[in-house]
Image: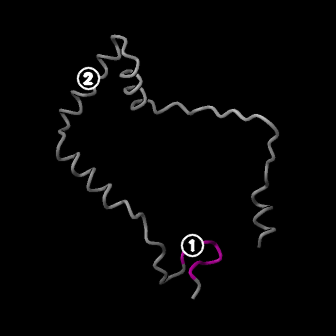
């Protein structure tokens, strides 16, 4: 029985992969953090960071802004020639 269908999906009866081997430990850490820190403590921490940011602490301000607006996407600069590939064409040639 093939493991995958022509469209790339797992075939019926196929177990698929083992999943993320670290997921269980990450879940345990998150549970421990949630049990150790209350919502009110998180709010107090955010207020403290915000107060420091408003008084000129750039790092504290950055932490608050990144949590609210998301991190700024870092620009990538490329020097030298760049060759672009047609992924569809490369896949067709490989098949």
Is residue 68 toward the left or the right of residue 87 in the image? left
Q: Percent position (x, y) of residue 1?
A: 57, 89
In the image, residue 22 sits, relative to residue 15, either above or below, namely above
Which image quadrant is residue 77 in? Answer: top right
Is residue 68 toward the left or the right of residue 93 in the image? left
Q: Residues within 10 Å of mark 1 (few under 14, many from 20)?
A: few
Residue designated by label 2: 47
In the image, residue 28 sits, relative to residue 6, either above or below, namely above
Q: Which mark is residue 25?
A: none
Secondary structure that dominates the magenta span: loop
Residues shaded magenta: 3-10
Q: Residues within 10 Å of mark 2 (few under 14, many from 20)?
A: few
Of residue 93 and residue 13, the one placed in the foreground of this image is 93
Which image quadrant is residue 3 in? Answer: bottom right
Q: Percent position (x, y) of residue 22?
A: 37, 60
For label 1, the SS is: loop
Q: Percent position (x, y) of residue 31?
A: 23, 52
Is residue 66 toward the left or the right of residue 54 in the image? right
Q: Residue at x 73, y 35 (%)?
A: 78
For label 2, the SS is: helix
Residue designated by label 1: 9
Is residue 61 toward the left or the right of residue 14 in the image? left
Disc on the earlier residue, 1 or 2 = 1
In the image, residue 13 sits, relative to residue 87, either above or below, namely below
> Is 57 one of the magenta-colored residues?
no
Q: Residue at x 80, y 42 (%)?
A: 82
């Amino acid at each position: 029985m093939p493991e995958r269908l022509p469209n790339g999906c797992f075939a019926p009866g196929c177990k698929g992969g083992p999943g993320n081997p670290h997921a269980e430990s990450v879940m345990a850490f998150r549970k421990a953090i949630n049990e150790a820190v209350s919502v009110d403590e998180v709010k107090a921490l955010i207020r403290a960071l915000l107060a420091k940011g408003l008084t000129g602490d750039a790092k504290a301000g950055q932490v608050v802004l990144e949590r609210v607006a998301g991190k700024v996407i870092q620009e990538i600069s490329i020097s030298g020639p760049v060759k672009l590939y047609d992924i569809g064409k490369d896949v067709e040639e490989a098949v």
